[in-house]
Amino acid sequence: MTRKTRKNNDNKLTKIIKLLSICSVYCFFFFSLSLFVPIKFVQALDYRESITAIVIGVSENGRQFIIDRGGEEGVLVGDVGRIWPAKNEEEAGNAQDAENAGEASEAGINSKKEEDPLFSAVAVHVRHDRSEWVIHNNYQEKPLQKNDTIRILSLYGTQRPRIENLEYWQKRSILKAEIDEEKQEFLEKQKKKVEDVRGILYKKYYLRTYKEFPWPSMGISLNVSPVTYRLPSHDRTLSYGIDVKNLNQEKYIYNGDYYYSGITNTYNIITREQYSSSNSRSNHTFDIKELWDPLDYTSLLQYKKERVGTVYTTRYQIDIGPLGIKYSFPKLVPTSSLKSLSISYIPLLEFFSSDDRNNNFTPPLGAKDIYWRHCLTLSTAINLNNRWSIEEKFTWRPYHSLPGTKLDLRNTDLRNTLAVRFEIYPQLAISYISTFTQDIRRKNILQIPASEWENSFYISYILQLKTDT
């Protein structure tokens, strides 16, 4: 390639680069121009610039009014304008010409009263599509009405004067109140949408009262507790169980459960002896709402068995209560988070058997007894929100010997259960259950503390078994 040919190619490349540079400058110019073209929609009103508007709201005293023009037309808080009536564009234009020229007779206005402005006002609250104004100088005793068409002429433009009582009227802005109300309505609608969506999930998965589910459609909850901690024995056990209840609880309510906990190859913290323990229990209740209005029918069946090492603290305990009454307190506040509050009484026939350490036999001989217990139960349930709930049940069961009428209030079986539940998903939940029990028989027969405190953390998986109508 010759030097001349190389030089020609360099010149062509230089021209191409210059051409691209010029094109980029023009492109940047047109792009910038396109950004500034709509500037009149966001720029403040200029001096003696006017806009036509429709009055869409007037306060009761007629001092404040709202128009359908706002930030998109350049209205800003603090703008001061002079207002004329404008029934149409031609008349509004004549009014503006009269103001600009200072000669109303040449503007084609028929009377002196019509050519004068109504009043001057200041903008106190602005949103993109509307603005609120407050009258501060009246020229005519003609109140504004809703749907009036007016013409607003800016008196100061961007050089807005300081209005002493501007903040006073801003605090009493009816437009601000409307915006706050609209915002609150919007938030409530959004919240309702979320609740509706969760309600659909609840209706499909969660164990609640479903009118469309026929009896005996059941909900089943499978529960596992990796750690159950007991005091004062300091045992750490693995627990699991199952809860069953009917879904449609409009008339009949059934609740049943079975739980088992146990541990092997552990050591006594005092004697360091190796031992194992197990605990099983089952509870079943059946209610009929308002069978004796306002009282409900309720019944109870319970079973419990406990073993520590080779000693059965409870070989069996069976409680049978086929007839009881229950009163559910009405909700004083419909929107309250208190889901239910009830008190019940059931006379129980109890069959009890356990080992007796008050003798010198090995293994210890058993102690058996049959007696009545008067079961008083106070239950409450609270829904903190759609996910968090709290349930508490307090049971007091004093001893009544058979035969006879002796009621021993010191020999009581006391139990309090607190359950805090968090729903991860309508079919999956975690809960903390704290149970305190006090039974004087443990001390009198087994020579162990009468009180026990059990703490468990459960993971629950929920199923539904729906029957056909």
Image (cartoon, rainbow, N blue to C red):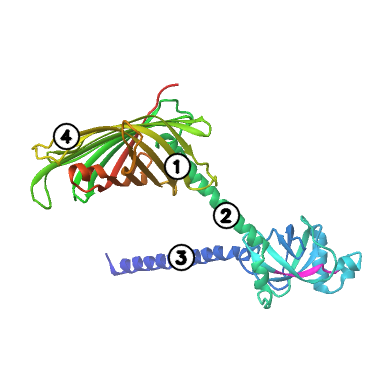
Looking at the rendered image, the disc whose residue lies closer to the viewer, 4 or 3, is 4
Q: Amino acid at mark 4?
A: Gly
SS for tag 1? helix
Instruction: Determine which residue is flagged by label 1.
Output: 198
Q: Is residue 288 magenta?
A: no
Q: Residues within 10 Å of mark 3 (few under 14, many from 20)?
A: few
Percent position (x, y) of residue 417? 34, 45
Residue labelled with disc 2: 184
Circle 3 SS class: helix
Residues at marks 2 and 3 touching, judged by CB atoms closer than 8 Å: no
Circle nearer the N terminus (2, 1): 2
User: Which is more toward the observer, 145 or 85?
Assistant: 145
Between residues 113 and 306, which one lies in front from this camera angle? 306
The quarter of the displayed image where residue 256 is located: top left
47 above or below 367?
below
Which comes before the other along the chain, label 4 or label 3?
A: 3
Q: Nearer the viewer, residue 94 or 295?
A: 295
Q: Which residues are magenta?
A: 116-122
Question: Label 4: which residue?
Answer: 366
Separation of residues labelled 2 and 1 (CA atoms):
21 Å
**Which tag, 4 or 2, sits closer to the chain's start?**
2
